[in-house]
Image (cartoon, rainbow, N blue to C red):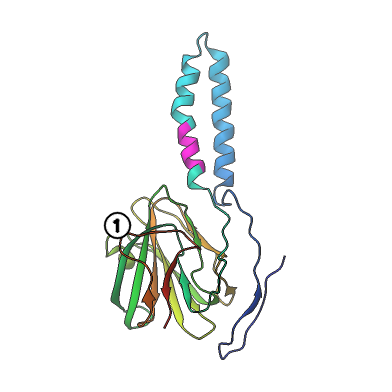
Amino acid sequence: MQSECKTNPMGEKFQKIKKLKKIRIHREGTDELFYSAFVLIAIAVILWRSFDTIVPFWCFVAVFGPAWLLMLNFYRCPIRYFNADTDRLVVAPADGKIVVIEETEETEYFHDKRLMISIFMSPLNVHANWFPVDGKVKFVHHQNGNYHKAWLPKASEENEHADIMITTPEGDDILVRQVAGAMARRIVTYAKQGEYCFIDEHMGFIKLGSRVDVFLPLGSRPCITMGQTTTGDQTIIAHLP
């Protein structure tokens, strides 16, 4: 099914048919999972046939079997749809825990105060990222940087990150920032400048633990609390003013 969207420059509501995305294992992990499974099975067969005892085989399975299952868990990508009206809503772009809810001076793009909401993703969370609002991608910018622990306040500005600016149908600019962490060394961003984007669509993927920041206009009403867990594409994190 193809996505169809129409919009007027004055910010009228988008008319859309959402593209159905049936992804069980994220595409970022299919090759790694397949080739690693092939190698592990080959080694296991060699161990099974090369020794008179099966102890080496079972020791190998006991160590590398759970490791492969952890990798499988890391690349899982549940099928989710936000079954409600999305007008003026901001939905969590990631699974994780709320670590920041504060007004902050955003000096790179807005040069004014914004409401910042940050979600920290542990290695055990789903690492797919979703668009938090409906709109049009204004620009995508990747910035090299450090790899501080993702939950530290300075990580948002100093760590390697990818910035996605989205203009909503009503004309609000929303900044979403994918932030690399001490373990996360690869940020993948699917958003492209000039394309329309919708809640339920994948914005990107971050390998290993990291965080996603959302910068909203002042007057936005947060719907979450510090330490609360979020479910990407499901948890409402704020209402736009």
Q: Nearer the viewer, residue 233 or 83?
A: 83
Residue depicted at 55% across the width and 47% down the height: 29
Q: Secondary structure at mark 1?
A: loop
Secondary structure predominantly adopted by residues drawn in magenta: helix
Q: Is residue 120 above or below residue 132?
A: above
Q: Is residue 99 above or below residue 39?
A: below
Which residue range is magenta in the image?
A: 66-72
In this view of the protein, can residue 77 be seen by the observer? yes
User: Residue 116: x, y in percent?
Assistant: 34, 72
Q: Is 228 part of what is drawn in magenta? A: no
Give the labeled residue for mark 1: 148
Q: Is residue 131 above or below residue 33?
A: below
**214 displayed left or right of 73:** left
Q: Quadrant of residue 103?
A: bottom left
Residue depicted at 47% across the width and 15% down the height: 55
Badge 1: residue crowd in 10 Å (few <14, some 14–19, many ≥20): many
For the C terminus, the quadrant is: bottom left
**90 displayed left or right of 22:** left
User: Residue 210: x, y in percent?
Assistant: 38, 56
Residue type, mark 1 in image: His
Q: Quadrant of residue 186?
A: bottom left
User: Residue 80: x, y in percent?
Assistant: 56, 59
Residue depicted at 38% across the width and 51% down the height: 122
Q: Quadrant of residue 40?
A: top right
Q: Is 68 part of what is drawn in magenta? A: yes
In this view of the protein, can residue 189 be seen by the observer? no
Q: Is residue 144 above or below residue 136?
A: above
